[in-house]
Image (cartoon, rainbow, N blue to C red):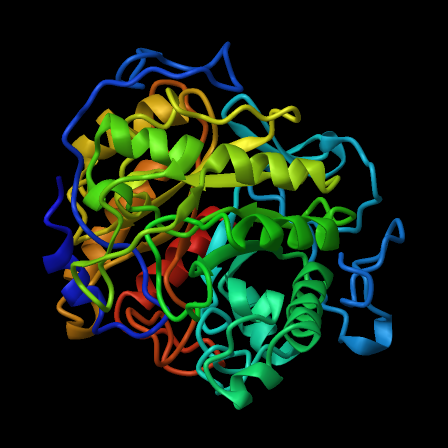
Amino acid sequence: MRNAYAAVAILGLWAAGGCGSAAGPATDTASSSSGRSSSNASGSGVSDSGLSGSGVSGSGGSTGLDASSSEQGDATASSGQADGSVDGGVVGAPVSAGVHAVGNQLYDGTNPIRLLGVNRSGTEFECIQGDGIFDGPTDQASISAMLTWDVNAVRIPLNEDCWLAINPPTAKAATYSGSTYQQAISAFVTLLLDNGIYPILDLHWSAPGTTPATEEYPMPDMDHSVTFWQEVAAAYANQPKVIFELFNEPYPDHDMDATSAWTCWQQGGTCSNLVLANPDGGVPVDYEVAGMQTLVTAVRGAGANNLILLGGLEYSNDLTQWLAYEPTDPDDNLAAAWHVYDINECSSTTCYTSEGGPVAAKVPIVATEIGAAESDNCTGEGATFITGIMDWLDAPGQSIPAQSYLAWTWNTDVKPSLISNYNGTPVCYGSTYETHLQSVNP
């Protein structure tokens, strides 16, 4: 078990958006049937080797909005593994028409790619707090600033209640939910696609029953999360460059790496020891969990074959049993999401190799959050840490191709920040990240 609550106390200072947390896994054995039988390890998981009306359309080469609704970017496709080309898709297109996994390599069509980018926090908390939808600008100028860093992927955290227009805590919050929220997300997704940037949609804040989604719960809920993903998947099924991360940071079973926790992660149901960690540290909650298999099935049932990312346990830092509990996917289009911060237990090259290596040998890893909790002191420790995880993902060894990563966060007021303004001026280790992206994604 990780010392989760000490870590969460630190993370709670960062801002409502939150990021990775907690420390590293104690190994427990598990067994499970999986959707990737030729790739999965058994036991420890370690091997040797559109909504209509939402603004999303189904036209073949279009990303869903009229050209007049957003300024067309001048980004062009990068070469080699970092190809950032994006064009539209069609409903019912084969997986190979968009972003998809083949073994442990991501492709866009026939081109091998890496996702290298940033998180754009705000859409998980602004709406439910009644403050708007985005935290900071999402116009062409702000995206052009990202392009100067050679960003080719942007992760957009979503709020379950805002999308579904349920449980608004205030009348003002209600005005930013439902179709208003969906159309704003769609417009931003469209602008990213127009600029050659892959959007990653992530269920970040959720809550069961009538509880407003104002924080990170341990697991998705059967009350709303399945419907959420059915609707999101239907809205973007015709855009196979859009990627789905089904749940931000699972931490079931009191944030333990145990068979019961992995079973809850995969199968859901009535799970024991569900405890809120942030900001209500230690408060037990009781609800029916939607497991990852249920959510994968919901996405595929909605007609979407988009790439799906699944984070492991302990705030997505623990991948030790990911292969053993990998859900069945009829499209065989899953990848592992990974969150790596300096406060995590798995935060060293040795751990990256021992825990991340076996997974990356079988399926792609997209580290959808990397960062350093101490970044604001600008002592250089943050730059050293983030360079270490980037270097490992750039060259995992053992004939594993370079993997993908996105730093937290492209915001000026959500910590740890990469920028001091939305012109893209780097702050602290943001400069290191910018330089590194430009060197690997020219």
- Name the image quarter holding the N terminus: top left
* 39 lies left or right of 259: right
* 245 lies left or right of 340: right
* 314 lies left or right of 406: left
- Residue 19 image offset from top left, x and y in percent: 32, 60
| Visible residue check, residue 165 | yes
- In the displayed structure, would residue 337 be above or below residue 426? above
The residue depicted at 47 percent of the width and 69 percent of the height is 124
- In the displayed structure, would residue 240 be above or below residue 265? below
- Residue 346 image offset from top left, x and y in percent: 19, 40
Q: Quadrant of residue 255?
A: top left
The residue depicted at 53 percent of the width and 19 percent of the height is 35
Q: Quadrant of residue 50?
A: bottom right
- In the displayed structure, would residue 220 be above or below residue 107? below
The residue depicted at 32 percent of the width and 52 percent of the height is 286
- Residue 61 image offset from top left, x and y in percent: 86, 52
Count of numbered labels shown in the rendering: 0
| Visible residue check, residue 404 | no
Q: Foreground: 422 or 88?
A: 88
* 288 lies left or right of 172: left
- Residue 128 image offset from top left, x and y in percent: 47, 77
Q: Foreground: 222 or 241?
A: 222
The residue depicted at 36 percent of the width and 39 percent of the height is 270
The furthest residue to the right: 59
